[in-house]
Image (tube, helix red, strand yellow):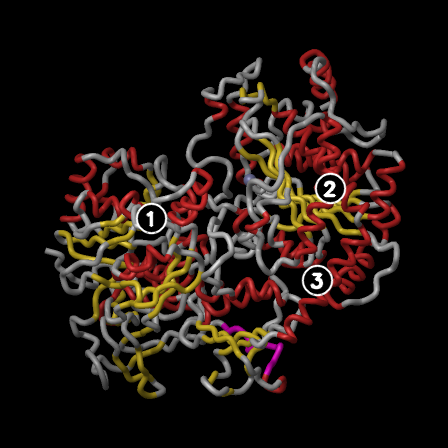
Amino acid sequence: MKYYTALSLLLLSVVSSAKPAYSPAPSQSTLPAPQQVLGFTVGDWHARHDQIQRYFEQLDAASARAQLEVIGYSHEQRPLLQLVLSSERNMQRLEQIRQQHVAAARDGATLPDDAPVVIWLGYSVHGNEPSGANAAMLVAQYLAAAETAEVKQWLENAIILLQPVLNPDGHDRFALWANMHKGAAPVADPQHREHIEPWPNGRPNHYWFDLNRDWLLLQHPESRARIAQYQQWLPNVVGDYHEMGTNSSYFFQPGIPSRNYPLTPKRNFELTAELAQFHAAAFDERGQLYYTEESFDDFYVGKGSTYPDIQGSVGILFEQASSRGHLQDSINGPLSFSATIQNQLTASLSTIRGAVAKRAELLAYQQSFYKSALQQARASKIKGYMLTESADKTRLAALLDVLQRHHVQVYALSRDWQDDDNSYAAGSSYYVPLQQPQYRLIKAMFSTEKTFKDNTFYDVSAWTLPYAYNIAFTALNREPASSLLSSSWPAAPAKAPPLTAGAYAYAFNWQDQQAPLFLQALLAEQLVVRAAMKDFSALSGDGEISLPAGSMVVAAGLQQQQDWFERLQRVQQRFTLPLQAIRSGLTPTGSDLGSHNFSPVQLPQVLLLAGPGMSSTEAGEAWYNLERLAGISPSMAEPQRLAQLDLSRYSHIILPDGNYRSWQDTEVTKLRQWLEQGGVLWGHKGGAAWLARVGLLKTGVWQGEEMSSLIPADNLQYQDKELLAGKQRIAGAIYQAELDLSHPLTFGLTSNRLPVFKNSTSLLQPSHKPFVNVALYSEQPQLAGYTAAEYLPRIKQSAVLLAHNAGKGRVIAMTDNPVFRGYFYGSSRLLVNALYLGHSFSADAG
Ligand SMILES: [Zn+2]
């Protein structure tokens, strides 16, 4: 160990003697320096997450100012790190400080005059933007080791929560790529492999999700761990350190003023601008270029720099031009990795300097934020929201879980209640009052806004959580009496009771979100299962039970395995879904169990196309949701390999969004032959459009220029260019689909209205043949978010979901992405149904 350290230090002194050291450099100290632990100077190589972790562990062990916590684990089981830094005195009473801080913020308790400001520094949520993660070591070292009066004053007046690597899986994917291509002399040529990552790049996490869109949605362990810390601490300032294009300079917020989120108080933007003075001064001093106010917005509240804004904190986005490797030519000359790290160090320290200088203002702002939230709630006509869902308690519980992770108070209705318009049943109704500290966050989560001051969106314009979960919600002007509201919820259903042996058949309802996982487990155990194509009732030990269309039946007489009942029991014990024992094949209503209206279900063998030319985000969303909602880990293959694949292994092929330009006649013929043999081919967005273009899907598609031409572009000036582009896009809005609930692909859904997420202008035309249109947009399809008025008539004429026969197989196509960002649990059911019920319908498209 010693030998290597000495050797690398020696090498460093030779190789990097010309390079200026990072500034400010920490004082001489007995604390470990990063290069002693890494074996190289920060910036000479891309430090892997485990190397960064080792440095923080050693710093933690050596410094009384620093405390390292593992706050969770990434998908790939890398520890998620948080280093708490403050003065020794503060570190000794950290928990007391935290409690006082939170009580003052949320409950208006009085703060001691010397209360520290809480500063959160989060780095490299995008894995291929590593300057932040590497700078984090220098920031921590400086704060732990410096003996200057200024740093001592910072630490006395601040608690610093430093999260060095927010996305360790993506970070390591990129670090390995950059390091494995590093030349002895760095190659600055932008065309060099080092600077061109393969698909999928290091930006997203294990499942190729953008973690910087998941702050509100919380679909991933990285986000859940982070938000738990956030809510524990309620920081006053959040620094979110990123990278952007190589030819840029440096950006810090304020962003584009007209694109701020309307519920964020004006004072937030004033404080952002005041803090910007500190960044500007630091960059001026170093002669570094930067800009503000012309890029990025603060609209979608699910990002690292916006989530804090809606909770009394000041979130600040920082963007450094990326060297994307060790050294890269740019329009501003060669950009080195070290230079990018230096800027992040500068901006981290200016954040601390600014936040400490503005300590009193920031603390006062946070208190006034929550106070005014309660005042606004009191003045609001809407008192709260009632959430109701009776058929799928699992899906409802998933939404409630997200609300609670954000410290939103939710109450179960303990007795049935009726207001002037509706009645709400206890057991399936939950009330979210607005009169609570998270008033603004709740308003943001439930917003159905359709008109906006500025129609250009950097990200989505709508994210209404209950729509995504397909949970009915009602804004109430009168609230239920507090005696009807219970903060202790009905206990989650216990494991299902033991099964009675000897029944004629066993059946379960398809409406619960667990049902597909249950079915998949049964099929994997080689049980024979049939799906009911129509509603029916059956006789159980307790009398007559109703089973809606889609219910799954395990008939004793069809089982092939000798120990099938033990297998059934084994699976049943993993779920809470009730399994009904049926006494007889003769049913009181609907088809008898031997009828052809029960369709056999097969174990799906799924191929998911995932590779260059496709959106890795959307392919990842399909992958993640197949696993979580159906228990299926698909085979994945690049579209370029299709011609070589043995497709006979697969029952289903899924084409997510992408351009599929590499596919020619060979691929079309191959897919057609596979369909002839009985395959089920699913495509959505770009995948669906491609199916239509090559004639595998029997309908037309409106897209691209044809759609844009609907927006008038006459008499525009050059300055209107961005405005026009904003109108032409659908950045992300929620629409209402109208379903044919008698079609097997919609089984399990109980309402014929389903919210779908639209972020493309590609539209499938409806079929003129009967039974092919499974879902169309409704008469009033706009639910939330921005869409140019000119597009609406065209959307109303379009189809959401089409499905028809192709040989012995089926083609199923959806205009929109059913699994957007992993939280559209409602529409994701359509994709899940295609896996199990893809052969249960027959519709001739001619
Ligand atoms: Zn980024």
From the Cβ of disc 2, is ligand 1 less than 8 Å away? no
Q: Residues within 10 Å of mark 1 (few under 14, many from 20)?
A: few
Check the picture and name the quadrant holding the C terminus.
bottom left
Question: Would you identify the image quadrant in which residue 737 lies?
Answer: bottom left
Q: Nearer the viewer, mark 1 or mark 3?
A: 1
The residue that disc 3 covers is: 369
Front one among 71 and 765: 765
Q: Considering the whole magenta stretch, tell me its main secondary structure.
A: loop
Q: Residues within 10 Å of mark 2 (few under 14, many from 20)?
A: many
Boundaries of the magenta span? 485-494
Q: Are marks 3 and 2 in contact (CB under 8 Å)?
A: no
Residue 724: % across, % down? 41, 45
Q: Nearer the viewer, mark 3 or mark 2?
A: 3
- Identify the element where label 2 is drawn: helix
Q: Does residue 654 appear anywhere in the picture?
A: no
Q: Residue at x 29, y 66 (%)?
A: 746
The residue that disc 2 covers is: 351
Is 440 a magenta residue?
A: no
Ligand 1 location (quadrant): top right
Front one among 66 and 517: 66
Mark 3 / mark 2, whichever is N-terminal: 2
Mark 2 / mark 1, whichever is N-terminal: 2
Amino acid type at mark 2: Thr
Q: Given the current orientation, which residue lies at the most extreme top position?
A: 14
On screen, residue 734 above or below 731: below
The residue that disc 1 covers is: 712
Q: Given the current orientation, which residue lies at the most extreme left position?
A: 846
Kindly report the distance in space between the C-alpha atoms of the residues bearing marks 2 and 1. Answer: 45 Å
Kindly report the distance in space between the C-alpha atoms of the residues bearing marks 3 and 2. Answer: 21 Å
